[in-house]
Image (cartoon, grey):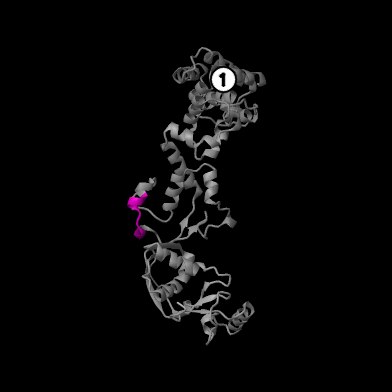
Amino acid sequence: MIDAGRAYADPYTPEEVQQFREEAQAAKKPFLYRNHRPENPPKWDGTTALRFKSDPRDYKWHDAVMGSLHAGAEAIDDFILVKSDGFPTYNFAHIIDDHEMEITHVIRGQEFIASVPNYLNLYEALHFEAPVLATMPHILGPDGKKKLSKRDGAKDVLDYLRDGFLVEAMINFIASLGWNDGTEQEIFTQQELIEKFSLDRVQRSGAKFDENRLLWMNGAWIRSLNLDELYERSKDFWPETARNRDEVYKKQVLGLVQERLKYFAEIPALTNFFFEDLPLDMELIDGNKQLKKFEHAELKTMLEQAKASLEQSDFSAGGLTERLNALLETTGQKPGVLFSLIRIASTGAPFSPGLADTLAVLGRETSLRRIGDTLRSL
């Protein structure tokens, strides 16, 4: 490029360049370095920056997403190719790198559109065929008004992986931000995305980052896993109290919470009562919208009936279901009352999977002991 007269050594100091900028600002004109090109630049010896000698002109180009775009000659300037420390700039290196790797499509965010005329100018100077250019829409914050940023609380994608979001779900979610295949389908495997993705289905407007949708999507992916795979992939997220429990028991627990699990970091909160006795929080009873209507003495009577009936159960999920349904008839209570009381008494938790299944996994000894402890508290 030097030999062809398309690159030259930058002879100016940073202070001189700053003076050029200030002069342009005072004249209320945009600063263009090419307006200050040296007539006889020194030979480049690597100790100064090397600049591209641009050929300013109007450009029109086709963007595979945004359609027909154009820019005037004022968008093109003499940018730095190699810095004074000897390192090439991104604006130079990526064009060489893409060409060497025979890249066919360059897909970037909207912040790069302003740089495209300079890139096209450089492609021409190098006699390279420009690749297909495609500009992705911005990913917007939850309010849908401005670009998603860390200032708005946006997390690094690795933080989501550390919280136990599945790689498949993250790929699915990110690929569908601003793109769809024209159907109502939302869950795509990676192979389906490869087969169905096309740039002409990418929208031009920004796509809102909806974390609730990500949670739903990740939950759907979690539910699609068989129990053995789910167990393997969630191994690092169990509470400390589960460390010495056997794999069979943990798989039983995991099978119960799989339906409501949205990401693996929720596992401790959803399962801790399976591995330890939680201290009874009477607010779970007194603050319950159904149970707070009853005096403690009434609740105690109800729970005594439940304990006596459960003591006769074989503690299989089927047997417990029959006992619990029979209790509804004998007590005349609604499931929201009776089952909530038994659940709180046996788990000490504000929520749990299905009651019969939960009691079956906890087992006879633990379930009845915890109910007895709650009776004494009442």
Q: Position of residue 265 (x, y in %)?
A: 55, 39
Which residue corresponds to mark 1?
367
Specify whether residue 194 is painted magenta: yes
Whether residue 274 is situated above or below residue 151 in the rendered picture: above
The residue that appears at 62% across and 17% down in the rendered structure is 372
Residue 3 location, quadrant: bottom left
Residue 240 location, quadrant: top right
Q: Residue furthest bottom?
A: 39
Mark 1 belongs to which amino acid? Ser
Q: Residue furthest front?
A: 45
The residue that appears at 40% across and 64% down in the rendered structure is 100
Left or right side of 107 for 183: left
Identify the image quadrant of the N terminus: bottom left
Magenta part of the protein: which range?
193-200
Does any portion of residue 32 appear in the rendered image?
no
Q: Main secondary structure of the magenta part?
A: helix
Foreground residue among 53 and 368? 53
Foreground residue among 7 and 301? 7
Q: Position of residue 28 (x, y in %)?
A: 57, 82
Foreground residue among 367 and 30? 30
Q: Is disc 1 placed on a helix, strand or loop? A: helix
